[in-house]
Amino acid sequence: MIKITNLSINYRKKKAVDNLSLTIKKGESVLLAGPNGSGKTTLLRAAAGVLNCRLGDISIDERKVGYRTRKKTAYIPASISFYDSLKIKEAIKLQAAFYPNFSYKGIADYHFNNSQKIGTLSKGEKTLFFLSLALSTKPEYLLIDDVIHFLDPHLREIFLMSILQLIEDERMTVVIAAQSSFDIEGILERVVVLDKGKVFVDETVDNLKQKFVKIYSEALPEHLPVVFFRDWQGMKEMFLYPYTPELKIKEKVEYLTLTEILRAFIGGGYVSH
Amino acid sequence: MLAIEIKEPVHPGDRGTGNSMTPRDEGKVCFFFQMLQGMNKGVFRDGIIILLAQLLLMAGLVLAGKEVILDPLLQIVLLFYASYTGWAIFEKERQEGAVEYMLSLPVSRTRLFFVKFMPRAIMILIVLAFYLLLRHLFDFPFVLETLSFSLTYVVFFFVSLAFSLSIKSFITAFLLTALLSLGQGFFIKMLDRTLPDSEALLRANLTILVFPLLFFVLFQGYDIKPLSYFNRKYAPPALFLSILIALFAFFTTGETWNNHILNKSGSTIRFKCKKSEILQQQEKEIKRFKYKGCVFPLYEVEEKNFLYAVKREPGRNGCPLIALIIIDLKSGKEKRLFDIPEGWDLVGLFPGKVGKLIDGTYYLVLQSRERQLQMIMAVTGKKVKQIPISGNLSNQYIVEFFHAARSSRQFFILTKDSMVYRVDGSGAAEELFYVEALAPWKDKLLVFDRSGMTLYKISGEAGLTPVYRQEGRIKKILRHWGTHETRLVIFKNGKEFFMLDLEKEEEPININLTFPPFYYLALGEKYILLHRQPQEIIISEIQKGKVIEKKRWQPRVEFEYEQIYVSPYGIMVYNEKEYEVYPFNK
């Protein structure tokens, strides 16, 4: 379980994470969404132990984040941080030297040339290789920062399938930071939307889909929880959250896909900025 | 549905097409295994290149017959190598964008540090060992001796390593390291010129090892935040440590002094152009009074515990005289008595032995070379009276001034041309005679001329009455740092040595002396002779015309031939840094 309690992380005067508390249970797969600068990457880095936290607390399986928790964690940063000058076989050896449970398993039938240098791989290949390395450490917690879109649709699907299998077989916890749920919705159970370093929404996917609706109206009703609105062909397109049938809205209520919901949240985030 | 194919594990040594490797046993991963991995790729290669470079350089320069430049060149190359190896400890990660990966590895920061550090340290030592072996085998001329160079080399590695995260430019890191190590060594050497180069370098190098320690401590909290965050934590203590090191070097490096004087009461005065000190041994402690500028001691009034001195302060033309002062030796407080006009100088060569106290009035002479003027200064309490010297010695340069009459204020002046003048209380000067040497004592004046010596008695306001005359090739034995005024006189007549006690009405006594002493004096009824040898002083006494060796004193302090000062209190030997006293009443 990843437990974050009253966590604050500042960059100079800017609060990247602001007194944030969140619990992610073992085996959960969570999407961290939010506009740019909402604190997604900072939160993942803190959980991966590459960023120190002085205010608040972050623990994994009741142990403060440190080198012991890093043994259980595989972290894939957005920029795929790795040694470009190493050959594939050297990179595998390096990873093996630090993870006792390491056993390299390639994803699908994708073949890498052992003598090829990491720096010469394409962005997608590099992402795939690095994801393979990460999964080969048999992590209990997989923290992925917005890299899946580097994979082509075929590899992305294969990768997500392999994650799904690990979630089912090994109860692996997956936290993915992304702007969109496109293609990954199938593995997600929960969505956490961050805004200005705080948790704005924390719902299961199903609940969120029920609670987030869109209506069209000529005027902006005062009593409704509108998170984002925009003008649309002379009408106002409004996104409501949390929506319940008790609100008794006379306009037609439209339910949305997760991708649309996230887009609306992110748009709302910018408006609120 | 797409299948996930997990390949059968294949050992990485297998050069087949598979990318898999055999699962390893669970448990702890070997440190050396981690150390030898790709994150340290290049360290061993760089080391081998530098080994080959050493060989090539050596071969080239030896074949060209330029062994003299071999060692400095090798040492510079090796210092660059050591510095680069230290500074570049995380350079691979920085260049390849692998910092985040490195920090996410499941090892503590300490272990991570050592994983990166150890291969570099090993390579550094191998390269050093190779260089020392070459030096030993081929015996080429060297700049820094083995220990000094080895230490500097290792320190360059460590200190540059301490700047590996903070400074992005290697040249800056190298120059900063050189400044802290070699620069500080020069600074220490500047503060203490007597210190051997190796010791100055050793001190400098040892103190700056705090930088890698500080780095190691702060590295424990190193994270992915921008470098400025690390620098904000690193720079203030590093700057503070630099200042502390400079202050430490400044205050711990023994101060050097131009001269040391031993007072009659046993206190020591040491001075240089910018500052002076009086040190008094009080029971087990040494009390220290500090003064700005050069306090040049003139005359100590032992019974009243104060000291007349002149003060010099650094100016445009060296250290000109500023003022006549009086120092209370109990409290160390100084009082300014008289500001000495510009262009005036003091008569008297021997510190601590200038001027004369008569009936509570201290007399000394000032002269102006430019204006060809001289004056006597009479200091009574705070009152200073100036008495211009008149007469026909206006173009003379006075080398010594003394008083040699018990009852009257008659002064005698010895000029550079060895002429003796008598000056009365009003300042009127009268030329007396030419002398080879002279020895005044109270109301007697022993004059050495080309044909012998004459002892005069000074009577009242009148002239000098000769009371004793000896003909021959008589030469007075001069005393090192001693005034002419002396009760005991030793002279050589032909090959024989004689002594004369001017306090007594006796004829000279022949003494069995082989070599002239460098100093002699009468202490009560004792006649003390001092001979010097390298790092040894022989103290003898004259008893009934016989010279009897009493003691051989071997001071702990190293001193040069000239670095000896004798006062009625004892003998002092000194060097630029320290001194040692042998009291006569020991």
Image: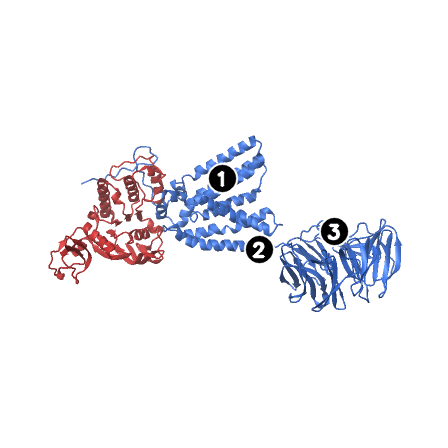
Chain colours: A red, B blue
| Same chain assignment for discs 1 and 2 | yes
Residue B352, horizontal then vertical, whole percent: 71, 60
| Same chain assignment for discs 3 and 1 | yes
Q: B317 or A122, which lies in front? A: B317
Query: What residue is rendered at 48% in x and 42% in y?
Result: B82
Residue B502 visible (yes or no): no
Q: Nearer the viewer, mark 3 or mark 1?
A: 3
- Which residue is under mark 3? B532
Q: Give the CA distance from mark 3 to mark 1.
A: 52 Å
Q: B101 or B307, which lies in front? A: B307
- Which residue is under mark 1? B126
Q: B87 or B8, which lies in front? A: B87
In the rendered view, does B433 fall on the left or right side of B333? right
In the rendered view, does A83 fall on the left or right side of B50? left
In the rendered view, does B582 fall on the left or right side of B85? right
The amino acid beneath tag 1 is: Ile
Residue B486, horizontal then vertical, whole percent: 79, 59
Cβ atoms at labels 2 and 3 below 8 Å apart: no
Which chain letter goes with mark 3?
A: B
The amino acid beneath tag 2 is: Thr
Q: Earlier in the sequence, mark 2 or mark 3?
A: 2
Q: B247 or A187, which lies in front? A: B247
Quick one: label 1, few (<14), some, or many (20+) residues within 10 Å?
some
Q: Earlier in the sequence, mark 3 or mark 1?
A: 1
Residue B498 visible (yes or no): yes
Which quadrant is the N terminus of chain A positioned in?
bottom left
Count of numbered circles in the view: 3
- Which residue is under mark 2? B252
Q: Which mark is residue B371?
A: none
Q: Give the CA distance from mark 2 to mark 3.
A: 32 Å
Which chain letter goes with mark 1?
A: B
The amino acid beneath tag 3 is: Arg
